[in-house]
Amino acid sequence: MNKISLIGAGNIGGTLAHLSLIKNLGDITLIDVVEGMPQGKALDLSQSSAVERFSGKIEGTNDFSKMINSDVIIITAGLPRQPGMSRDDLLETNGKIIKKIALDIKKFAPKAFVICITNPLDAMVYVLQKYSKLPKNMCVGMAGVLDSSRMKYFLSETLQVSIKDVETFVLGGHGDDMVPLVNYTTIGGIPLMDYIKSKKMPILKIQKIVDRTRMGGGEIVKLLKRGSAFYAPASSAIQMAEAFLLNQKKLLPCAAYLNGQYGLKNMYMGVPTIIGSKGIEKIIEVKISAKEKSMLKKSVKSVQGLVSAVDKLL
């Protein structure tokens, strides 16, 4: 049985545990610094096994050494965004948390495939790899699957089509400068712009969807008033973990380490990847327009600024 360790037992951590058990992905170790929280959620989830008919076991603990020999680790630990905050406002506090977790992973689970969800995402996955010394293909950030999922939903609602027929993905950092790729968006295989023309819809609607995708997380933070999104982020991370555990060779956008791809080096950035049993097995480079290149350049600058800042703080 696979072993999955979830570091952070808050809303995302609890949802990750639930999804992992229902999908029978493995046994779960739920870890948090708050006494009682992981133990309570583990007990609650265990008692649902008779109803859901899953066979996986779950343990809640405050002991980080219990992550030992994990196949997959998903990190959600850290402060969530509050209304009025950007992801970048969390840099110093969450940077210190991720550094400590990274050192624990280096000690107890150096062979795990590790997915980081903590914000600001691109800077945090950089810190995670730097201090854990994990192979770069085994240390990734969850952002692209989530951002793409949000855009797919907004498109399906606006165009009144099945979400199953919408394909798209997002490049760049997980922030307000992300780059949704309209040119690679299709509706049932039909390029989005052709579909829009056939329906005689104003192109302005598409720009509104792009803008809403960029602010998708902030919209939820504002509505919740306390905390941030957790269902869609958890589903997105589970899709990545499943691709690794089941060797699906799945094309998924995520924050991956770049070493020359897209003209970028020594940084993590959201790009399309193939995820299989070896982690990030390939980074897919796609042609982008001059306008998209300009937007990507701006996103890169934002990420590089965060990385530079977090290096000074830690």
Image (cartoon, rainbow, N blue to C red):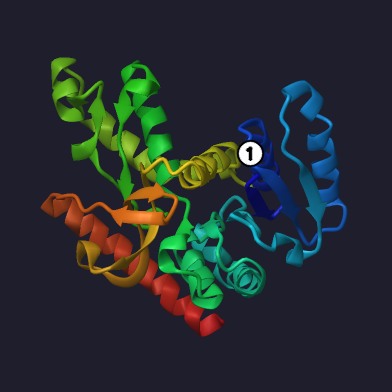
| x, y percent for residue 65 | 75, 67
Mark 1 surroundings within 10 Å by alpha-carbon count, few (fewer than 14), some (14 through 19), many (20 or more)? many
Q: Left of 58 or right of it: where is 279?
A: left
**Which residue type carries mark 1?**
Ser
Q: Is residue 10 visible?
A: no
Q: Nearer the viewer, residue 241 or 182?
A: 241
Quadrant in the picture for residue 79: bottom right
Q: Which residue shows up at 65% across the image and 31% down it?
A: 22
Q: Relative to residue 212, is residue 283 depicted above or below?
A: below
Image location of residue 114, percent across then percent down: 54, 59
Up/down of 101 relative to 284, above or below: below
Which residue is identified by label 1?
20
Image height check: is 273 above or below 313? Answer: above
Taking the spot 62% from the left edge, 66% from the top edge, the residue there is: 109
The quadrant the C terminus occupies is bottom right
Q: Secondary structure at mark 1?
A: helix
Q: Is residue 170 visible?
A: yes
Q: How many marks?
A: 1
Q: Is residue 39 left or right of residue 20?
A: right
* Farthest-out residue, front: 1
Residue 59 in picture, x, y percent from top left = 79, 49
- The answer to which of 129 and 149 lies nearer the viewer is 129
Is 111 rendered above or below residue 27? below
- Residue nearer the viewer, 5 or 94: 5
Write down the quadrant of residue 205 in the picture: top left
The N terminus, quarter of image: top right
Horizontal side, residue 7 vs residue 249: left or right: right
Q: Quadrant of residue 150?
A: top left
Residue 215: horizontal and vertical position, in percent?
A: 43, 45
